[in-house]
Amino acid sequence: MTDNSVEIVFNNFTNFSFNLVAATVADDGSWIQRPPETIAPSQQKVTWGTVAEDELAGVAGSVTYSTASAGNLVINWNNPLVGFDTNTVSPPLECFFVEGDSHGDQETITISIIPNVPTNWLNESIPSNWMQQNLATLGNRTLQQLCLPASHDAGMSVYTAGTIGTVANNTQTQTAGIYGQLVAGARYFDIRPVVILPNDSSDIYTGHFTATTGNVAGALGQSLASIIADINNFTATNNELIVLEFSHDINLPGLLGPLPTWSAVNLDQDLWNVVFTALLGINHLVKDVSYADLLTTSLSGFIENGPAVFVVIDAELNTPQAPNTITSAYSGIYIVPNGASSFIPGGGYTDTNDLSDMMIGQLKLPANISTGPYFQTSWTLTQTDGEAALSVVDSSLSILSLTQQANSAIGALYQACSSAVFPNVLYVNDFGNSKAANLALAINFSNFAATGDQA
């Protein structure tokens, strides 16, 4: 017996049942575990495998599964003793596949079958004012009844400065600035403010760091001043609703030279006041809507008479004091009260670089949400520490390279949606090169979001 083997890990992200038609293994191999007779809808982590009988032989095999209405699924694998392994997948109709492969003598192939997003939505060109153009249909919906396409780590479209060992490959999450993301359809933005002493608005940036306190590694991205300019430029010609969620706040009070880490603390009240003052430069901040009414105000209520922007502050530690009243000078800037989670979306990201594991985690999130009626899906992959280090010289391991994998499989989320379960906030990296806006509109126009009855 040899160690030359192939294991298949199969994930079914469709509503199809797969029924085994044929399973073969080459003459010089045998089954370690036979494929199952049936794979149920949405069943994941199904495994089978083959092994070479002779230490001087490779191993190859094939399976064919049928579906009731979408044709066959065929998977072939060949791990030769010498040369490159070859694997092919022929998915059923209206589906595509994503493959992950660990090469070597003991090879593991992960295959995920994913339903297509309806092609009429996938191929649509999303207008920059998609909310206003669809106000007749979506205008009566509240934010609880809508799916908003969202930008994760939205300010990290540039690498401004960072600690030793950081480069764009291990800190940059976006390829377009906030204006470009808005034009591409994003309406909800994950903004992570970093204040650098001295305390004036020109020293406020976004950041991507390993933590928010202590000795942190990471980098600065787009400045808050340029983000505000982008927003004002966009709302000058587009009557859209824009939501900014501020979190992961950091103050860097020390030396920001070429060091392995920088010293960080959370923002105190004085520094939050600096941020608030800068935010007052945003045009069209929401007025006459209380914090309690954010989720129950209709889209038309926000933008029927023009563009609207509001900011939600979810402070890390020191909850700032600022009036949350409609008559406040800070109208349109809302502080999440201590212990409250009514607006900040429940859910979270799946801390993995494995596409299938991320998909399994995110597709299960809606059914498991217990933190409130408003929740997010974070369709993102996370570098390992090793990938972050190696990506300094190898762009194939970069955050944006991982992002291409995640964004290619976003269609799986459509299949998981229903009138009871859908994401209110759909986070992606590299928003401008994703189909997040297409998918959000597909969800909004499929009556999934019509009732707002979240799980």
Image (cartoon, grey):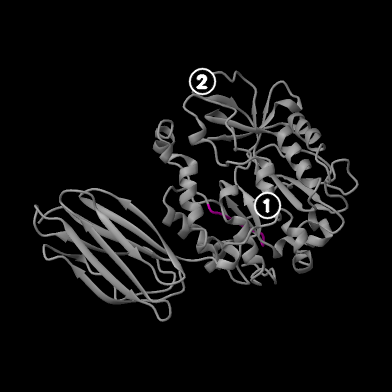
225 to the left or right of 316 = right
Residue 34 is situated, as x and y percent measured from the top left of the image, at: 23, 69
The residue that disc 2 covers is: 259
Label 2 secondary element: loop
User: Which picture quadrant has residue 2?
Assistant: bottom left
Tell me which segment is drawn in magenta.
373-379
Question: Please, what is the three-letter code of the amino acid marked with disc 2?
Answer: Leu
For label 1, the residue is 344
Q: Is residue 202 above or below residue 353?
A: above
Left or right? Give the position of 330 relative to 432.
right
Identify the residue shown where x is 34% and y is 63%.
Answer: 89
Q: Is residue 14 magenta?
A: no
Residue 326 vertical position relative to residue 278 in the rendered view, above or below:
below
Q: Quadrant of the N terminus?
A: bottom left
Mark 1–mark 2 Cα distance, whole angstroms, equals: 34 Å
Q: CB of mark 1 within 8 Å of CB of mark 2? A: no
